Amino acid sequence: MKLTIIGSGAMAAALAEGLAGKYELEFIARESQKLEELSQKHNASYSLLGQIDISGKNILLCVKPYALDAVSDQLQGKARTLYSILAGTPISALTKKIDAEHTVRAMPNVAAAFGESATALTGDEAIRVEALEIFDAIGESLWLGSEKELDIATAIAGSGPAYLALVAEAMMDGGVKQGLGRNASMALVKTLFAGFAPLLAEKHPALIKDSVMSPGGTTAAGYAALEEGKVRDGFIKAIEAAFRVTQK
């Protein structure tokens, strides 16, 4: 199957990296330099945006939501399938702008480049199996029953890497503040994150916490400081705030 990626930004590049070798790719974008770099890297065909015929194509729409109008004006014909990763852009808005037999909304993240994306999907049930197959190629995908759920998932799966990056950076800085070298602090946090994924796959977070926290110990002291700083509340509010943006 050939997939046509429209866009040349960070998510387009991450998706291309994860899908390369598993699907035939082609690119459409407005920026010629990035377009050429992507096409050369993945040995793919490309076209500059401008009255492009998308008839029968399987489109991965990877542009910013505000660019939908400008981009759709440059597309002609009826696509076979439209996969949109535009946050907060409902299917009703997409179908008014881009004609396609099937339309699916997807929310992957930049870990797609390493085949580790958490991707939420919703849309045309007729293409569900195919959609899951495509996005399973870049990690693990989950089909949701409504666009509201997809918008909530966007706040977790899509924005999540930024939140986890904040945690990682803060922990690194904490080590440095106490006197640990920057390189050593970074190395420890990187290893910590790599080792946490298989733990989370097997145990509920509360059980992981309980297995580490001994009475009156170091973890208990640190955990109490996090609670005092309302870190848990802050993350819950972050998901809420991100979700609200998708509803505007």
Image (cartoon, rainbow, N blue to C red):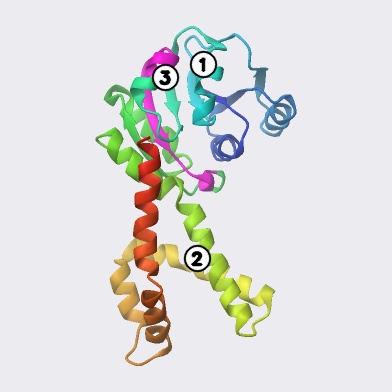
* Residue 79 is inside the magenta segment: no
State the extent of the magenta-drawn residues as a range.
Answer: 95-112
Q: Position of residue 173 (x, y in %)?
A: 60, 73
- The answer to whether any part of residue 1 appears in the image is no
Is residue 185 visible in the rendered structure shown here? yes
Provide the residue designation for mark 3. Answer: 81
**Mark 2 — residue?**
167
Judging depth in this view, the residue of 219 and 197 nearest the camera is: 219
Nearer the camera: disc 2 or disc 3: 2
| Amino acid type at mark 2 | Val
Task: Name the residue at the right extreme.
Answer: 33
Choose mark 1 or mark 3, whichever is in front.
1
Task: Give the distance between the C-alpha atoms of the residues marked 1 and 3, in whole angstroms.
Answer: 15 Å
Q: Of the residues under marks 2 and 3, which one precedes in the sequence?
A: 3
Residue 55 rendering spot, x and y as whole percentages: 49, 9
Q: Are marks 2 and 3 in contact (CB under 8 Å)?
A: no
Local secondary structure at mark 2: helix
Q: Which residue is mark 1?
A: 72
Which of pointers 2 and 1 lies earlier in the amino acid sequence? 1
The answer to whether residue 102 is magenta is: yes
Q: Secondary structure at mark 1?
A: helix
